[in-house]
Image: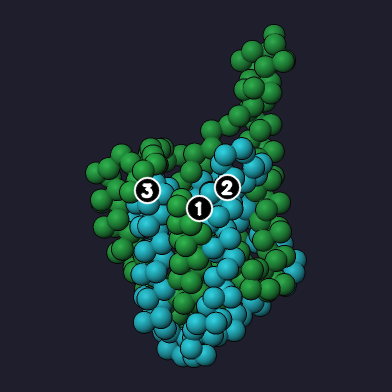
């Protein structure tokens, strides 16, 4: 293992992480809900009466974020996203993420942040599973092929 | 008031994803590439988020209502089963293939990234497939238990939708 110093951004990542934690904290304390993206989105399939509106309000804020970020952030923090995956790979990956997050009842936010923060053994197992699979897939894709 | 707070929380969460680098699949894959040129940044994202969350959930566990006055819905499930692990493994495999998890994919789509739109469309199809599979499983179960009254199928087809 060697550290990729050229891409390492400890301070921006820590600050971003604190913001993610703050959002999760506000959501449980103000709205009484777990901030889990796959659960919030998946609950709209199919949409249910009196249940869809809070999900849509949250998603509206999420969708507004890149535009507000572009307007506020200094140019040094506006880095271009590197999306190397082909269209076919994106489709396969999207299907796996969609089925997997619903089947395992959570993703990086619900299990990885909220679950670990409330010391849930169930979320720890889920996080180890998706982290492990992520490490394994990248290892195979980058070092075996 | 609830709608405003949900909007602001969504906004803050999106800003956190953008600032942390989670919306850059190249950076995510750099973190998952433990045996190559490793970028440890995402450990700082998780660390910062869990640190703040830890105190919030410690406080939340002592309450039954939220500060805006609704029910405080902490997950009750402690079940660690095959379903949890297989779901996690499938999700992790998809995450490792493209470098997108659901939140950053939605933010990138909203920013106008075409590739993120393709990913999100496939992810939604995956979620629909999940609903169909669990719905079908619930129908089959209900028929097994009570094959005398097929009319009950519709009402018993609701599968538990536990979150997290």
Residue B85: image location, x then y, percent: 49, 47
Label 2 to label 1, Cα distance in Å?
8 Å
Residue B124's label in the rendered image is: none
Say whether mark 1 and mark 3 are on the same chain: yes
Residue beneath disc 1:
B3
Residue beneath disc 2:
A53
Determine the secondary structure under disc 1. Answer: helix
Residue drawn at x 64%, y 27% is B157
Residue B1: image location, x then y, percent: 45, 52
Residue B90: image location, x then y, percent: 58, 53
- Rendered position, A3 above or below B87: below
Residue beneath disc 3:
B68
- The chain in green: B
Q: Nearer the viewer, residue A48 or B146?
A: A48
Residue drawn at x 50%, y 66% is B11
Determine the secondary structure under disc 3. Answer: loop
């Amino acid at each position: 293992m060697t550290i990729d110093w050229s891409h390492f951004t400890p301070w921006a990542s820590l600050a971003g992480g604190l913001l993610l934690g703050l959002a999760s904290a506000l959501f449980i304390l103000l709205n009484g809900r777990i901030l889990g993206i796959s659960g919030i989105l998946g609950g709209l399939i199919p949409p249910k009466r009196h249940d869809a509106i809070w999900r849509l309000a949250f998603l509206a804020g999420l969708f507004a974020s890149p535009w507000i970020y572009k307007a506020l952030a200094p140019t040094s923090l506006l880095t271009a996203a590197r999306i190397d995956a082909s269209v076919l790979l994106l489709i396969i990956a999207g299907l796996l993420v969609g089925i997997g997050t619903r089947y395992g009842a959570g993703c990086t936010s619900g299990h990885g942040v909220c679950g670990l923060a409330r010391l849930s053994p169930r979320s720890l197992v889920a996080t180890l599973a998706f982290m492990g699979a992520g490490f394994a897939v990248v290892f195979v894709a980058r070092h075996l092929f | 008031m609830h709608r405003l707070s949900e909007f602001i929380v969504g906004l803050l969460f999106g800003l956190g994803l953008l600032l942390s680098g989670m919306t850059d699949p190249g950076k995510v894959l750099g973190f998952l590439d433990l045996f190559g040129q490793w970028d440890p940044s995402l450990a700082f994202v998780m660390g910062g988020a869990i640190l703040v969350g830890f105190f919030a959930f410690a406080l939340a566990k002592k309450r039954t209502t939220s500060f805006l006055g609704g029910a405080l819905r902490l997950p009750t499930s402690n079940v660690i089963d095959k379903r949890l692990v297989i779901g996690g493994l499938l999700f992790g495999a998809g995450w490792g293939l493209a470098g997108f998890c659901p939140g950053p994919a939605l933010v990138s789509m909203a920013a106008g990234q075409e590739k993120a739109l393709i990913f999100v469309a496939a992810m939604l199809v995956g979620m629909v497939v999940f609903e169909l599979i669990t719905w079908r499983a619930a129908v089959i179960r209900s028929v097994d238990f009570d094959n005398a009254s097929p009319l009950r199928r519709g009402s018993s087809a609701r599968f538990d939708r536990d979150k997290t």
